[in-house]
Amino acid sequence: MIVPLKDVSISARVETGLTRTSVDLTYSNKLSNTPIEVEFSYPMVNDQVVQSFTAVIGDRTVVATIKNKEIAKVEYEAGKAAGKGVIYAERKTENDNEFLKLKLGNLRAGQDAVITIKLIESATELIGGAYSYRVPSKYFPRYKIKGDKRGLPYPEYDPNVYTFKYKVDLAAPQGKVINYISSPSFASYTEQIGRTLVTIEEP
């Protein structure tokens, strides 16, 4: 079942040789009157390592731990059968592409779930002290407004039911400032000279 995103928020901090990224993805079950199971697949880029993975489901926080794959699957299915809000994550490789496959069980009717993935990767430094930071486009799924007649190959959403936004925050290494930012892949962004925080937003 497709559960449209309400919000994507990405925070990244460039440190000496490293980039730390936190991805917050908010989903909401407004499509079903009963609890549902949803699956997500997110691409892993470069040499990313998952530092932590948590989910806030309603008023309950679930923190993922590393376990034997088969044991984790059994525990996930048992928790789901018991009606608990549970999560399962597995790193997979298909056709030389790495991605994180996530499952969220028992998202109740009208309930929100906030998935937080914290990642660490090497910072790519370019000529002249510039850094390259890439955000996979699959973090930003495309939807079309309900009733759109153009035949776009995207899931529909009703703007009266769902609203969503995309946001990226970038922070410079400690003691440094951001003097220039180029974001050709975003329709809108704000370049704030001399400040250590840059916000890029896609409405």
Image (cartoon, grey):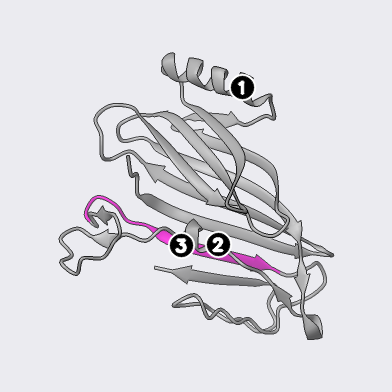
Q: Residue at x 73, y 70 (%)?
A: 172
Q: Residue at x 25, y 55 (%)?
A: 156
Mark 1 / mark 2, whichever is N-terminal: 1
Residue with the mark numbered 2: 136
- Looking at the rendered structure, the kind of residue marked 1 is Glu
Quick check: marks 3 and 1 in contact, CB under 8 Å?
no
For residue 70, the mark is: 1
Say which quarter of the image contains residue 197.
bottom right
Mark 3 Cα-neighbour bin, 10 Å: few <14, some 14–19, many ≥20: some
Quarter of the N terminus within the rendering: top left
Q: Position of residue 192 (x, y in %)?
A: 61, 81
Q: Position of residue 170 (x, y in %)?
A: 64, 67
Mark 2 Cα-neighbour bin, 10 Å: few <14, some 14–19, many ≥20: few
Q: Position of residue 7 (x, y in %)?
A: 43, 54
Residue with the mark numbered 3: 166
- Looking at the rendered structure, the kind of residue marked 2 is Pro
Mark 3 / mark 1, whichever is N-terminal: 1
- Looking at the rendered structure, the kind of residue marked 3 is Tyr
Tag nearer the camera, 3 or 1: 1
Tag nearer the camera, 2 or 3: 2
Give the magenta-colored segment's residue range: 160-171
Secondary structure found at label 3: strand
Quick check: marks 2 and 3 in contact, CB under 8 Å?
no
